[in-house]
Image: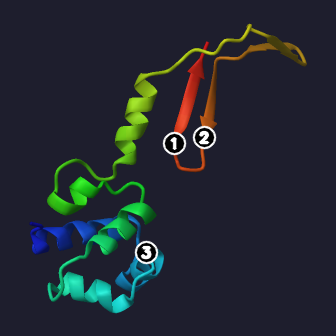
Amino acid sequence: MVNTSDFTTRLQKVMEYHHLTASLFADKIEVQRSSISHIISGRNKPSLDFILKVTTTFKDVDIYWLLNGKGTFPKEIEIAEKQSSHVPTLPFEEKKIINSDTEKKIQRIVLFYTDGTFEEYKK
């Protein structure tokens, strides 16, 4: 069972991290503004639908952290650290790029995806 006061604290931490008021937060996750105030005041408990909307809209919120405080927030920091620790190499030949009077070599290539993740390739 979710501890409502701890859940409220974590929910407020998410709002503060993203610099959102309760009404802007409600608009972002597409719920009624009164839903947020009722959850924060302790009048209502969060529904599964509410929790899924939060974790779907804010990719940096881990569902286990939101529900019971286990894990970290924001979780994208973990993802970035894991990705940077495993850097695959590119199967390409080293090409020298001559620009004016300086010679340049490709050191690494970083691909950024729309979901906020990235891949880094080193020679």
Q: Residue 91, which numbered label?
A: none
Of mark 1 and mark 2, the one earlier in the sequence is: 2
Q: Nearer the viewer, residue 19 or 7?
A: 7
For marks 2 and 3 on the same chain, the one whose residue lies earlier in the sequence: 3
- The kind of residue tagged 3 is Ile
Q: Quadrant of the N terminus?
A: bottom left
Q: Are marks 1 and 2 in contact (CB under 8 Å)?
A: yes
Q: Which residue is mark 1?
A: 117
| Residue at the image position 71 percent from the left and 11 percent from the top | 92
Report the side of 36 relative to 119 (left or right).
Answer: left
**Could you tell me how far apart the alpha carbons at marks 3 and 1 are, in whole angstroms?**
21 Å
In what quadrant of the picture does the C terminus appear?
top right
- Check disc 3 and report the residue beneath it: 29
Image-based side of 91 in relation to 1, left or right: right
Q: CA distance from mark 1 to mark 2?
A: 6 Å
Give the percent coordinates (x, y) of residue 121.
59, 22
Q: Is residue 58 above or below residue 71?
A: below
Residue type, numbered disc 1: Thr
